[in-house]
């Protein structure tokens, strides 16, 4: 029986792009997703099991039917503001969900997991660019649950020899070049898809949350990374674990920062639309600048982002939204 890679949350934004990448690498892929926020239409149906990770009995059945070599774990809630209003849901789905997954992995002797983590584990950074050794002081429930999950994996490694790679993404953006899968959240809170709603005729203007930060133009600076570059990093992380290497944590970003104003400007060029913008008050909990150092991932995984210009990222996002103005529905 060929060994399979289980991708949890494979119907979500980053998950579905990673599924596509792994299939192109000829991996045998199965997806476990409860479809709470994922999209059935982002996948070929033969890959999908609609199961919640907290349903250990059902999850265990899948592990018994398939010869699972490793898990790529995306399934989680990931909206910062929602996490502040619903901490119980975030702890239950994210932290307890991983606990169930690791327990079933342990029972089935599955020893490798690649984990979807976030720059939100750092909180307000003391130094830029951020390196993996920097302090982790999350400023929101979402980041705190992801940090708790990293720590859980550390102790499951000690106790059960389950090796993990934790990938701390900065600002995931863009879409598959085909334009037939992409980003769709409900509600949408991310900057680039919100900007693109203007040329789509779905919103009048974009609000810029604060222009009095200590950055060059006063708006917040972020490190935008193409979703297909994140996908390739998951593959390299799996190869790293296949090489029997120790558990590790890696940042994933471009190392370039773009301000909110700069992102809007590039979107104006790409879409050839004036995209009106208006300054609003700051959004609570936004650090002024988040930029990754990804030197460690480059050195140890051999990762090199391929799509690192913001034009390319927004151009690919735009193709998806233009082809699918209503998303998957
Ligand atoms: N922004 C606006 N207007 C908007 C939406 C966003 O000005 O309508 C600004 C935000 O204030 C922020 C920047 O655009 O300065 C980017 O905001 P996003 O919401 O797109 O992304 P965040 O940087 O807040 O969050 C992202 C991920 C989180 C993750 C975080 C840190 O979405 O999951 O990076 O890693 F936790």
Image (cartoon, rainbow, N blue to C red):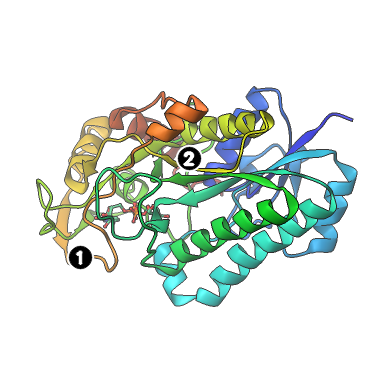
Q: Residue at the spot x=11%, y=54% of the render?
A: 214
Counting the numbered discs, the total is: 2
**Quadrant of ligand 1 in image:** bottom left
Q: Residue at the spot x=28%, y=48% of the render?
A: 198
Q: Which residue is mark 1?
A: 282
Determine which of the numbered discs, if any, sits on residue 274 in the image: none
Q: Closer to the camera, 304 or 188? A: 304
Residue labelled 1 has its Cβ within 8 Å of some atom of ligand 1: yes
Q: Is residue 180 visible?
A: no
Q: For residue 113, what is the image quadrant?
A: top right
Q: Is residue 301 visible?
A: yes
Q: Secondary structure at mark 1?
A: loop
Quick check: 132 above or below 136? above
- Nearer to us: label 2 or label 1: 1
Percent position of residue 71, x then y: 69, 44
Left or right of 192 on screen, residue 179: right
Q: Closer to the camera, 110 or 156? A: 156
How many other residues sit within 10 Å of disc 1, few (<14), some (14-19) or many (≥20)? some
Q: Which residue is mark 2?
A: 324
Percent position of residue 307, x then y: 39, 26
Cα distance, mark 2 to mark 1? Answer: 31 Å
Left or right of 153 on screen, residue 219: left
């Amino acid at each position: 029986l060929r060994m399979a890679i289980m991708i949890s949350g494979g119907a979500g934004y980053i998950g579905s792009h990673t599924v596509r990448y792994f299939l192109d690498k000829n991996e045998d892929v199965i997806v476990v997703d409860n479809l709470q926020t994922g999209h059935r239409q982002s996948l070929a149906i033969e890959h999908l099991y609609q199961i919640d990770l907290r349903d250990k009995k059902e999850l265990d059945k899948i592990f018994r039917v398939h010869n699972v070599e490793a898990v790529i774990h995306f399934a989680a809630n990931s909206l910062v503001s929602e996490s502040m209003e619903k901490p119980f849901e975030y702890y239950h789905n994210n932290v307890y969900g991983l606990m169930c997954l690791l327990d079933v992995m342990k029972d089935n002797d599955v020893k490798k997991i690649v984990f979807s983590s976030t720059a939100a584990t750092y909180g307000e950074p003391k130094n830029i660019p951020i390196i993996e050794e920097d302090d982790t002081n999350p400023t929101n429930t979402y980041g705190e649950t992801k940090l708790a999950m990293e720590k859980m994996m550390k102790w499951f490694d000690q106790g059960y020899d389950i090796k993990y790679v934790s990938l701390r993404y900065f600002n995931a953006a863009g879409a598959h070049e085909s334009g037939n899968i992409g980003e769709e959240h409900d509600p949408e809170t991310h900057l680039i898809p919100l900007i693109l709603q203007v040329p789509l005729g779905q919103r009048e203007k974009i609000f810029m949350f604060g222009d009095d930060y200590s950055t060059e133009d006063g708006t917040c600076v972020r490190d935008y990374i193409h979703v297909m570059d994140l996908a390739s990093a998951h593959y390299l992380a799996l190869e790293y674990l296949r090489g029997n290497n120790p558990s590790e944590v890696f940042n994933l970003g471009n190392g370039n920062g773009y301000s909110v104003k700069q992102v809007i400007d590039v979107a104006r060029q790409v879409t050839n639309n004036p995209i009106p913008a208006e300054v609003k008050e700051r959004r609570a909990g936004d650090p002024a600048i988040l930029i990754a150092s990804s030197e460690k991932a480059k050195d140890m995984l051999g990762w090199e982002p391929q799509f690192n210009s913001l034009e390319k990222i927004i151009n690919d996002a735009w193709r998806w939204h233009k082809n699918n103005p209503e998303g998957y529905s």
